[in-house]
Image (cartoon, helix red, strand yellow):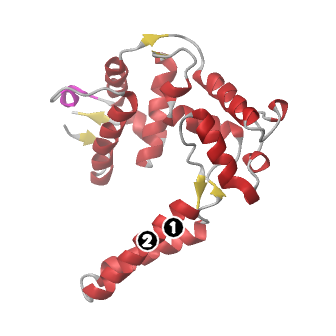
């Protein structure tokens, strides 16, 4: 299958994303099934068909918000009435106890929010160090290898110790939760909303591939 409007790296990332999507929604593409897909719209239709759950017109974003608000309230992090769509996450998860509070909500929800990161200046420095170390591999391989090892360990520490918020508001969090845990936040189990799921899949691919939604939507495969 050839991918128009996508470069080589994006093609590779798309193939990997499809494997991840199979795990998220618990289905499996048949052999060569993807090869007959002509464009991104058809790809979404195929994915929704493969998920094969009852179509219900209820709004998943609304359900995700209620579930988040309930989880935050039950863990006594904030009052039920204080959690609104425009509320800033730093008000719910203050820096001092942020990791502990988020783990409490994770446990209540049954999945991880994954909203923490290291400061941008640290990750930017690690990316620069990774490029320099990769170049050194061709000239001073020992120094390059040491550099890559340090970079890998640095990214591991970022994932483990990062305490900055990736997103700002409850609205952003609802969008992230729906995109990454669509089936888990549906009030009616084993159901989907086909109309909204296509938009959710578009956002998910855009986020994972680092491509604007308009380019994703216009991608054709022949």
Residue visible at 63% across and 22% down?
A: 63
Q: Quadrant of residue 173?
A: top right
Locate residue 77 relative to residue 17 in the image: left or right: right
Residue visible at 35% across and 34% down?
A: 23
Q: Let me know if residue 131 appears in the view.
A: no
Q: Pick out the residue farthest to the left.
A: 31
Number of disc labels: 2
Q: Position of residue 177 (x, y in %)?
A: 57, 35
Q: Quadrant of residue 30?
A: top left
Image quarter of the N terminus: top left
Q: Are marks 2 and 1 in contact (CB under 8 Å)?
A: yes
Q: Is residue 17 magenta?
A: no
Q: Is residue 34 magenta?
A: yes
- The local secondary structure at tag 1 comes to helix
- The disc at residue 153 is 2
Which region of the structure is painted magenta? 33-38
Q: Which residue is mark 1?
A: 157
Residue visible at 34% across and 41% down?
A: 17
Residue visible at 38% across and 28% down?
A: 25
Mark 1 nearby-residue class (10 Å; few <14, some 14–19, many ≥20):
few
Mark 2 nearby-residue class (10 Å; few <14, some 14–19, many ≥20):
few
Q: Position of residue 16 (x, y in %)?
A: 30, 44
Q: Let me know if residue 44 appears in the view.
A: yes
Q: Is residue 193 above or below residue 115?
A: above
Q: Is residue 162 above or below residue 50?
A: below
- In the image, 18 versus 215, the foreground residue is 18
Locate residue 95 relative to residue 209 in the image: left or right: right
Q: Position of residue 134 (x, y in %)?
A: 32, 77
The Cα–Cα distance between marks 2 and 1, rounded to whole angstroms, is 6 Å
- In the image, 163 versus 202, the foreground residue is 163
């Amino acid at each position: 299958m050839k991918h128009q409007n996508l470069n080589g790296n994006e093609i590779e990332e798309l193939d990997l994303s499809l494997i991840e999507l199979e795990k998220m929604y618990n289905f499996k593409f048949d052999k060569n099934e993807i090869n007959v897909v002509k464009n991104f719209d058809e790809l979404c239709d195929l994915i929704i068909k493969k998920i094969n759950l009852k179509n219900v017109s209820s709004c998943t974003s609304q359900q995700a918000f209620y579930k988040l608000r309930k989880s935050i309230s039950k863990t006594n992090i904030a009052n039920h009435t204080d959690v609104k769509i425009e509320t800033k996450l730093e008000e719910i998860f203050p820096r001092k106890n942020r990791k502990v509070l988020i783990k409490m909500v994770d446990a209540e929800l049954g999945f991880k929010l994954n909203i923490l990161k290291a400061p941008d200046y640290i990750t930017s420095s690690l990316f620069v160090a990774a490029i320099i170390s990769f170049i050194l591999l061709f000239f001073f391989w020992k120094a390059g290898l040491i550099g890559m090892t340090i970079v890998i360990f640095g990214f591991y520490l970022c994932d483990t110790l990062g305490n900055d918020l990736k997103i700002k508001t409850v609205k952003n969090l609802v969008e992230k939760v729906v995109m990454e845990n669509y089936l888990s936040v549906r009030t009616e189990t084993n159901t989907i909303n086909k109309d909204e799921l296509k938009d959710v899949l578009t956002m998910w691919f855009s986020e994972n591939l680092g491509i604007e939604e308009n380019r994703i939507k216009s991608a054709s495969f022949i």
